[in-house]
């Protein structure tokens, strides 16, 4: 099949490709450059309208196999198909716009999984890549810290209650994990990584390397940015949908120790969405009535639903203050100082003791009066606000 040899490789890379031919060469070559060589590379071409077939033909290595769908299946079905076709014991699914940073990452991952059968998957932080240049480590992907270690699966589940536990291009997992999870929900068009890593963690412990050994490429046409731009309503609703799905699967598995984390995580996410509607007039974010209904429809019982809604109410003033400050930081960066000052004042009305809005107001006044550009000094403050908003 597709030139596959009789000997099964130990590792299978599933390279997901749709309108990403201009990045495919860098992705595949970063795999072929690995010091560990017992692998196959399945280029899952989802009937891409660009020159993906021509780029794929340039790879003369027999381990590289180009599989082109006759019609466009969509991200999740193409992902599923790729995993089903793999022959390796371990599976690494990676988008064609991402790539490996270290030549030894595969060797380290394989050795770790071989030596630790209780570990279902292994990951590391991801380094940003913009226009071919390194940026910085993706902070949320480095949450376990600065030391290599084995994470208890429940520790990963607690993290999953608030955000995706690991960056997708950094994961090497046992194929057995995919088999045990079974089919992926057809309701998910994105966030499949969030769903998978959490469910894997219900069955296994998780390995972590502190060194950032992969690249997550940031560009205007990557899937997340395209979805947020073109389908904002479903983009944000699916993040909540996957949280509910994971919570229900964890409850089915009888894992109760993280239930309180998911209650708090859902409350925080709904609160941020409601703040976005209030501060930025995001009409595709649900109203309070819609949120109340959604929570009651999905909660395990009435008591749980009321607890989530209570946490939203309690967290609202602080979250709204942060939302105004975040919006003000956006205006400040754009040089719209009057609007920035108005937002920061709204933030201070809700939280008079906050320091960051006061600093920004002072900086805005200085720039208005003297043209002194202080933005580089305030990037750290804005990053802190933004990280709260998107976590």
Image: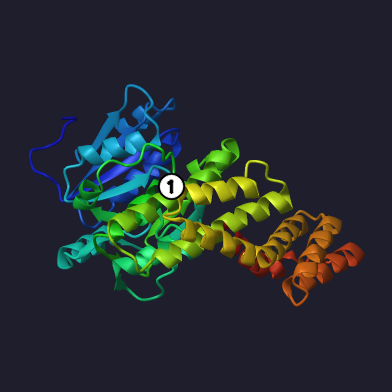
Q: Nearer the viewer, residue 221 or 241?
A: 241
In the rendered image of this protein, does residue 19 appear above or below residue 269? Answer: above
In the rendered image of this protein, does residue 270 appear above or below residue 388? Answer: above
Quadrant of image for the N terminus:
top left
Residue 205: image location, x then y, percent: 26, 66
- Badge 1 element: loop
Dot 1 corresponds to which residue?
Answer: 191
Residue 6: image location, x then y, percent: 7, 38
* Residue 238 as seen in the image, left or right of residue 43: right
* Residue at the (43%, 49%) spot, across then down: 242
Q: Nearer the viewer, residue 310 or 179?
A: 310
Residue 252: image location, x then y, percent: 29, 55
**Looking at the rendering, which quadrant does residue 214 occupy?**
bottom left
* Residue at the (20%, 46%) spot, across then down: 179
Q: How many numbered dots are placed on residues in this image?
A: 1
Q: Nearer the viewer, residue 182 or 10?
A: 182
**Looking at the rendering, which quadrant does residue 253 occupy?**
bottom left
Q: Nearer the viewer, residue 25 or 376?
A: 376
Q: Looking at this rendering, what residue extends furthest in the front direction?
A: 302
Q: Looking at this rendering, what residue extends furthest in the right direction?
A: 369
In the rendered image of this protein, does residue 179 appear above or below residue 74? Answer: below
């Amino acid at each position: 099949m597709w030139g596959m040899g009789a000997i099964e490789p130990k590792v299978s890379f599933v390279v997901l490709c749709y309108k990403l031919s201009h990045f495919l060469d860098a992705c595949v070559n970063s795999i072929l450059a690995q010091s560990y060589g017992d692998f196959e590379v399945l280029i899952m071409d989802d009937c891409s309208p660009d020159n993906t077939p021509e780029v794929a033909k340039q790879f003369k290595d027999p381990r590289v196999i180009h599989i082109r769908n006759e019609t466009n299946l969509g991200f999740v079905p193409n992902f599923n198909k790729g995993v089903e076709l793999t022959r390796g014991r371990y599976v690494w699914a990676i988008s064609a716009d991402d790539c490996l940073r270290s030549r030894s990452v595969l060797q380290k991952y394989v050795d770790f999984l071989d030596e630790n059968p209780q570990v279902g998957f292994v990951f590391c932080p991801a380094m940003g890549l913009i226009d071919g240049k390194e940026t910085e480590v993706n902070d949320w992907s480095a949450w376990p810290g600065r030391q290599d270690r084995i994470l208890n699966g429940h520790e990963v589940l607690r993290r999953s209650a608030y955000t995706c536990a690991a960056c997708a291009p950094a994961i090497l997992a046992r194929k057995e994990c995919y088999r045990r999870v079974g089919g992926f929900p057809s309701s998910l068009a994105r966030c499949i990584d969030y769903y998978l890593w959490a469910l894997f963690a219900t069955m296994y412990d998780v390995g972590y390397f502190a060194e950032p050994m992969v690249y997550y490429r940031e560009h205007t046409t990557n899937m997340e940015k395209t979805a947020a731009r073109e389908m904002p309503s479903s983009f944000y609703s699916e993040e909540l949908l996957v949280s509910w799905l994971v919570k229900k699967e964890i409850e089915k598995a009888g894992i109760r120790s993280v239930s309180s984390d998911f209650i708090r995580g859902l409350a925080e996410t709904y609160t941020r969405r409601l703040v976005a509607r209030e501060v930025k007039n995001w009409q595709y974010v649900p109203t309070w009535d819609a949120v109340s209904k959604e929570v009651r429809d999905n909660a395990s019982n009435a008591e749980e639903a009321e607890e989530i809604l209570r946490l939203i109410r309690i967290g609202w003033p602080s979250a709204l203050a942060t939302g105004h400050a975040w919006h003000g930081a956006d205006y400040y960066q754009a040089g719209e100082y009057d609007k920035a000052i108005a937002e920061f004042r709204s933030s201070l009305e809700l939280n008079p003791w906050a320091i960051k809005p006061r600093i920004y107001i002072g900086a805005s006044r200085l720039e208005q009066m003297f043209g002194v550009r202080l933005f580089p000094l305030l990037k750290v403050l804005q990053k802190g606000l933004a990280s709260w908003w998107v976590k």
